[in-house]
């Protein structure tokens, strides 16, 4: 498995277009070997362009691509030693499940015993071990895609496994278990994986590192926890999380940040700026019984079921925010509730960007 270095790689489909209009703005990234990366972002942000550059389907307008230090920019897909999993299953209907999984290994002239061992290992990890003798044509679309995934992961000598929205055709009920299986198998086999999805939930539950893209740029790269806890911009705060992060406009009076005329304590230094927003995840807003520091009166404007949880929409100082609460907590009987914005979980944003770093030697 290879480390991938993306060195000043950028791409435009329109010759002569100014760089600001390129599908992929020139970027520098290192994807470490044996890690799983998800490229996530809205339609048209450049995910597929970047993936196609990695696979060799698109030759970048500029820059170099290195696999373990070797320049592969000019190499065709075949010569790049990569495995690919597409949106739709790519399998041989005339073969059994076993033969489908063994095919990439036979092409590489692995010996029979090694093929047998590896196919069983992959089949077991994907829950296909009891179906190896079945003809592939009889399988459901879900199972066929499972085989495509297996074929992508069966070779342990590929530089990287590239996956392009591989769960699109999967029944929503099965997505969860399949995501778990892909995660388990990648933890077990440790390939370098680049996984494209427009579904932030899929990216966050699958990848060790998530790259959020917007307008042809990677605007934040981090672990799922980093993206959840400290979105670098309001865009990432909105895009990652369900419901999205809450953002509230606050005042700065002297050195003190205030909301609804009350002090709002934060574990961060807040710069002096004409307009400051604070972000707080709906998961961290707490309904409380008594007034205290960072507790604000709100009015309930709506209640929505959200699986095992409930989302309350409340109005705080004329601004709407969401509060995620466990279902068993019930819905507050009164339309007016007190909510706490926990000091350590409230982040400052200026001009749409996270404005500062935690205070050194913070007392809490
Ligand atoms: N073959 C092409 N010719 C011209 N423009 C293209 C081509 N492929 C993509 N683009 C443009 O490049 C930009 C990035 O597209 P890309 O497909 O990489 O985005 P994406 O994030 O993968 O979107 P989606 O999730 O819809 O596939 C878009 O503006 C798109 O219209």
Image (cartoon, rainbow, N blue to C red):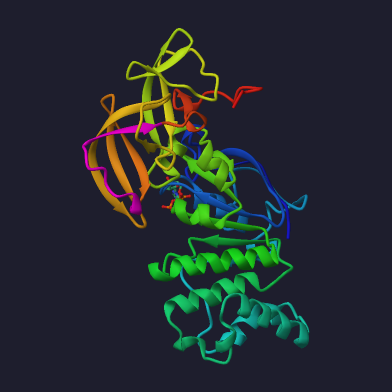
Residue 254, percent from left and from top: 45, 7
Determine if the magenta segment contains residue 347. Answer: no
Please indicate, yes or no, whether residue 23 appears anywhere in the rendered image. Answer: no
Q: Does residue 241 appear left or right of residue 107 in this picture?
A: left
Residue 63, percent from left and from top: 65, 42
Q: Does residue 219 appear left or right of residue 116 in this picture?
A: left
Q: Does residue 114 appear left or right of residue 241 in this picture?
A: right
Vertical side of 304 occupied by 260: above or below: above
Number of marks in picture: 0
Span shown in magenta: 327-340
Determine if the magenta segment contains residue 333. Answer: yes
Please indicate, yes or no, whether residue 55 appears anywhere in the rendered image. Answer: yes
Q: Quadrant of residue 102?
A: bottom right
Vertical side of 107 occupied by 291: above or below: above
Residue 105, percent from left and from top: 70, 79
Measuring 49% from the left and 47% from the top, which residue is drawn there? 46
Vertical side of 51 occupied by 229: above or below: above
Q: Residue furthest top?
A: 254
Front residue of 217/189: it is: 189
Measuring 39% from the left and 17% from the top, which residue is drawn there? 258
Front residue of 110/339: it is: 339
> Which quadrant does the N terminus fall into?
bottom right
Front residue of 221/76: it is: 221
Residue 288, percent from left and from top: 37, 35
Measuring 76% from the left and 82% from the top, which residue is drawn there? 114
Front residue of 10/257: it is: 257
Measuring 47% from the left and 87% from the top, which residue is drawn there? 137
> Which quadrant does the C terminus fall into?
top right
Q: Residue furthest front?
A: 290
């Amino acid at each position: 498995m290879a480390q991938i270095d993306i060195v000043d790689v950028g791409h435009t489909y329109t010759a002569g277009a100014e760089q600001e209009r390129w599908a992929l703005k020139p970027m520098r990234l290192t994807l470490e070997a044996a890690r799983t990366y998800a490229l996530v972002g809205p339609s048209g942000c450049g995910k597929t362009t970047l993936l196609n550059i990695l696979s060799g389907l698109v030759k970048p307008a500029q820059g170099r691509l290195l696999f373990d230090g070797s320049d592969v920019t000019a190499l065709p897909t075949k010569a790049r030693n990569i495995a690919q999993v597409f949106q739709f299953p790519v399998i041989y209907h005339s073969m059994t499940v076993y033969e489908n999984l063994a095919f990439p290994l036979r092409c590489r002239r692995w010996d029979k015993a090694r093929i047998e061992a590896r196919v069983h290992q992959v089949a077991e990890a994907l829950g296909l071990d009891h179906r190896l003798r079945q003809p592939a044509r009889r399988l459901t679309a879900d199972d066929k895609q499972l085989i495509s995934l297996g074929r992508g992961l069966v070779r342990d000598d590929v530089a990287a496994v590239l996956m392009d929205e591989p769960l699109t055709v999967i029944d929503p009920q099965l997505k969860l278990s399949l995501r778990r299986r892909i995660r388990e198998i990648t933890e077990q086999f440790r390939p370098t994986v680049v996984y494209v999805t427009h579904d932030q939930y899929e990216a966050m539950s699958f990848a060790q590192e998530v790259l959020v893209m917007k307008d042809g740029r990677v605007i934040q790269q981090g672990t799922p926890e980093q993206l959840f806890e400290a979105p670098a911009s309001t865009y990432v705060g909105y895009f990652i999380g369900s419901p999205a992060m809450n953002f509230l406009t606050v005042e700065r009076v002297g050195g003190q940040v205030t909301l609804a005329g009350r002090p709002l304590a934060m574990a961060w230094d807040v710069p002096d700026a004409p307009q400051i927003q604070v972000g707080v995840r709906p998961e961290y807003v707490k309904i409380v019984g008594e007034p205290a520091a960072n507790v604000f009166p709100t009015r309930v404007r709506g209640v929505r079921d959200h699986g095992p949880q409930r989302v309350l929409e409340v109005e705080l100082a004329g601004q709407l925010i969401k509060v995620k609460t466990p279902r068993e907590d019930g819905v507050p009987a009164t339309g007016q509730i007190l909510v706490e914005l926990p000091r350590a979980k409230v982040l400052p944003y200026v001009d749409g960007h996270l404005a500062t770093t935690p205070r050194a030697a913070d007392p809490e």
